Image (tube, helix red, strand yellow):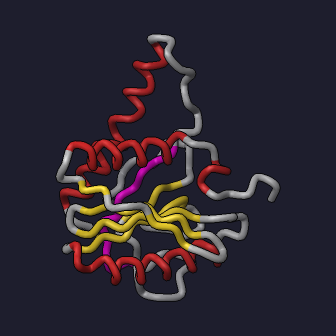
Amino acid sequence: MYPWIKAFIAFVADSLPGTLRRISELGSCQPHVNLRRVIAYELADAVANGSDDRRQPGAALDKDTSQTVRSSDNARSYYRDAAAVIEVKRFPYQQRDAYKDLFVYMRNIYVNQHNRRYAWGLTICGTHVRACLFGHDKVIASDAMDVSTVDGRHRFVSLLVNWALCESAQLGYDPTI
């Protein structure tokens, strides 16, 4: 993962608990017990547990809400625990390759998580971020969020915060299983 992306994701993840605590102290909202961790994986040569290939996503949103492990430097991606995966490429023209890799990661998520109705993914190519919704029969991708602009950064941070706070069913987990 590229350092600026890792630093940006870590900033959002580390800022969120304190921000929520301050908001709940003001009485504006209830404290969230379902806060998920955003983990940026550093080891690009490590193979994710449960994977049948040699690829590893650049980052993942962990479905764990315990907040017990915060060291992202020693973390390894586990498809059985990933709520969403992120594929990172250096240049915007590599979007097609990012989609190809994301398809493989989604296949591994569906193989390891039988309780998924759909799964989320992100591609980051240069400064362009796209959110992808992977269903069993189709894929929907958002328009590019250019994080070099204020509006693009706002949309990207909003997406990360919403993923960290939403219910499991909104991340694609089937509550009936």
Closer to the camera, 165 or 131?
131
The rendered magenta stretch, by its main secondary structure, is classed as: loop
- Residue at point 50% right, 55% down? 62
Quadrant position of residue 100 = bottom left
Give the number of marks: 0
Residue 173: x %, y % from top left:
67, 57
Screen quadrant of the N terminus: bottom left
Q: Is residue 105 magenta?
A: no
Closer to the camera, 144 or 127?
144
**In the rendered view, would you say 47 is above or below 40?**
below
- Residue at point 19% right, 74% down? 91
Residue 109: x %, y % from top left:
58, 72
Left or right: residue 1 versus residue 36 is left
* Residue 91 seen in the figure: yes
**In the rendered view, would you say 151 is above or below 63?**
above
- Residue at point 49% right, 79% down? 103
Residue found at the far bottom of this picture: 53
Closer to the camera, 173 or 67?
173
Residue found at the far front of this picture: 143
* Residue 75 seen in the figure: no
Q: Is residue 45 magenta?
A: yes
Screen quadrant of the C terminus: bottom right
Residue 82: x %, y % from top left:
53, 62
Closer to the camera, 177 or 89?
89
Per the rendered image, the range of residues in magenta is 36-46
Left or right: residue 34 versus residue 16 is right
Left or right: residue 147 versus residue 53 is left
